[in-house]
Image (cartoon, rainbow, N blue to C red):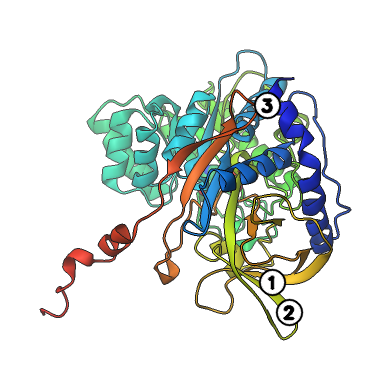
């Protein structure tokens, strides 16, 4: 064990006690920190310890403070471990030599340095818009490791993707017709596939369930005539060599996800049997592994999901098919934290309220749908040390001017006081990288952290904080007379 990790481990305990306590009150969890290392396939779970170190260092080094009251932090060690766990999970179940492309769903954390880091860890990119494709290209992700999925690709997007050789999954018959025309007009290296909706049902979060009967994504397989149409579409197009499904994101039981993959595999087998050859050579199983927002441990793990797939769809891994995965949240969520200063501490109606700088602008889902998206909040003092002390029921509020701007309501945690810091945990995906410009609140700076040679913490800029000049410019500043002059 090197000095850095030893250092990290020692100082873990104080902070963890607080966080476990915070969540025990909130979730009824026993406070277990779930310290497990499930063979080589599961990420180590000392993220809480590294987080405590990083919070302290961010305060000491002045990254966050009175003049910069909110930042986002990304744990590079944790991200690397997650990437390694994903590789190990599928390597453990796939026949040797099976081509496997893990393509990170860029929408989960659309930040160029994150995509670059993942690329260096052997992870490609799944993109779903011209912006996401531009980010992946800026990160140096090659076309051969990029997959384009989106339900609304324009002809220009499709043409560019095919010119670059990026894999494309068509969403529907009309899109396939556009691809037909492009394939006929110019040769392409792009592997081409079709997205199907196995219609296995939804999870607990309707907005994120993509395999319901009426989901907008892909060809709905169980609709009358649809399956036969899909088979014919392949038989008529020898260049259609991939099959794609993504059954949902968060809130989906693993068994349901596995059933979606099994349906997709079964369809690939049927198409190949009817074609009399292995026309479909690659199955893209999508992402969607849910994240546990109640503890530091990542559960379920990539290893558990891969083993479930291996037992329920063994043919998928016997070497006849290449595989593509598109995990997003499960790679990044655990490795991000928002750190926000408590500007004021007050009471109203007997309720303690910490008014912090983290609210709807960095956690839109939690603020608007708190029941579906509860987040853990950690309490740190003005020096960035984990707060001890009795739990007090309090609200953790954001800076936006509407009453619902609460990150946590009636949460039990050590009393947050003026100058303290609230750490909003598990926000590495779909949170601070997804700024919501309410009240023209600035996008906070984002910094990655890792160990330095002396056992301390080193930071690197991921995204600079948005300036007021940028806010004005992005809000029509150059067109000030535009309306008054009409
Ligand atoms: C959103 C999405 C993903 C990633 O989902 P996660 O829940 O973040 O893993 C993968 N593939 C497609 C097509 C998606 O829309």
Give me the residue at 54% from left, 43% from top: 61
In the image, residue 70 lies at what x, y percent?
A: 52, 56
Q: Disc 2 to disc 1, how far (Cα)? A: 7 Å
Q: Outermost residue, top direction?
A: 97
Q: Secondary structure at mark 2?
A: strand
- For label 1, the SS is strand
Number of the front mark, 3 or 2: 3
Please give the name of the residue rendered at 68% of the width and 38% of the height, measured from the top-left corner: 50
Indicate left or right for 293 with 99 as reference: right
Residue 215 location in percent, x, y? Answer: 55, 58
Whichever of callouts 2 and 1 sits on the residue coming sooner in the sequence is 2
**In front: label 3 or label 1:** 3
Where residue 62 appears, x then y in whole percent?
52, 47
Question: Is residue 471 shown above or below 75?
Answer: below
Q: Are marks 2 and 1 in contact (CB under 8 Å)?
A: yes
Ligand 1, by image quadrant, is top right
State which quarter of the image contains the N terminus.
top right
Residue matched to label 1: 395
Q: Is residue 312 visible?
A: no
Nearer to the camera, 303 or 440? 440
Numbered mark located on residue 351 in the image? 2
Measured Cα–Cα span from mark 3 to mark 1: 35 Å
Q: Measuring 42% from the left and 38% from the top, which residue is drawn there?
A: 112
Looking at the image, residue 240 lies above or below residue 421: above
Image quarter of residue 263: top right
Q: Is residue 482 visible?
A: yes
Q: Give the position of the C terminus as an image quadrant.
A: bottom left
Q: Mark 3 — residue? A: 4
Mark 1 crowd level (few <14, some 14–19, many ≥20, 10 Å Cα)? many
Q: How many C-alpha atoms fall within 10 Å of the one at disc 3: few (<14), some, or many (≥20)?
A: some
Task: Out of 76 and 71, give the one closest to the viewer.
Answer: 71
């Amino acid at each position: 064990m090197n000095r850095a990790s030893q250092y990290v481990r020692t100082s873990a305990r104080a902070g963890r006690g607080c966080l476990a306590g915070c969540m025990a009150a909130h979730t009824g969890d026993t406070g277990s920190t779930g310290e497990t290392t499930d063979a080589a396939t599961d990420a180590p779970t000392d993220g809480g310890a590294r987080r405590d170190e990083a919070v302290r260092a961010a305060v000491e080094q002045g990254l966050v403070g009175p003049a910069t009251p909110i930042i986002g932090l990304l744990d590079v060690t944790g991200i690397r471990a997650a990437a390694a766990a994903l590789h190990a999970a599928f390597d453990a179940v796939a026949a040797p030599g099976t081509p496997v492309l893990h393509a990170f769903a860029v929408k989960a954390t659309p930040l160029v340095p994150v995509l670059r880091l993942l690329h260096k860890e052997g992870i490609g990119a799944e993109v779903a818009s011209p912006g996401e494709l531009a980010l992946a290209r800026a990160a140096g992700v090659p076309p051969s490791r990029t997959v384009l999925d989106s339900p609304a690709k324009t002809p220009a997007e499709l043409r560019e993707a095919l010119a670059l050789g990026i894999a494309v999954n068509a969403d529907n018959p009309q899109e396939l017709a556009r691809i037909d025309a492009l394939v006929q007009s110019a040769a392409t290296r792009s592997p081409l596939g079709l997205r199907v909706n196995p219609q296995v049902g939804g999870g607990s979060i309707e907005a994120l369930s993509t395999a319901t009967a009426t989901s907008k994504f892909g060809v709905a397989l169980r609709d009358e005539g649809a399956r036969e149409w899909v088979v014919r579409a392949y038989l008529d197009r020898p260049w259609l060599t991939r099959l794609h499904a993504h059954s949902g994101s968060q809130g989906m039981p693993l068994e349901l996800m596995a059933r979606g993959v099994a349906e997709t595999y079964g369809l690939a087998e049927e198409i190949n049997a009817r074609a009399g050859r292995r026309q479909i050579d690659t199955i893209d199983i999508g992402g969607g592994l849910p994240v546990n927002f109640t503890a530091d441990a990542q559960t379920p793990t990539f290893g558990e999901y891969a083993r479930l797939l291996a037992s329920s769809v063994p043919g998928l891994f016997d070497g006849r098919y290449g595989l593509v995965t598109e995990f997003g949240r499960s790679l990044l969520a655990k490795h991000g934290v928002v750190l926000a200063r408590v500007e004021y501490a007050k009471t109203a109606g007997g309720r303690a309220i910490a008014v912090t700088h983290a609210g709807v602008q960095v956690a839109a889902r939690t603020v608007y749908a708190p029941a579906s998206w509860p987040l853990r909040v950690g309490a740190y003092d003005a020096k960035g040390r984990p707060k001890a002390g009795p739990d007090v029921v309090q609200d953790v509020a954001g800076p936006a001017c509407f009453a619902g701007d609460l990150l946590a309501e009636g949460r039990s945690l050590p009393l947050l006081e003026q100058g303290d810091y609230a750490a909003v945990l598990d926000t590495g995906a779909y949170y601070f990288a997804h700024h919501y410009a309410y009240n023209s609140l600035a996008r906070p700076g984002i910094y990655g952290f890792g160990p330095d040679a002396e056992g301390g913490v080193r930071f690197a800029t991921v995204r600079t904080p948005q300036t007021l000049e940028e806010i004005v410019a992005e809000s029509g500043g150059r067109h000030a007379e535009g309306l008054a002059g009409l």
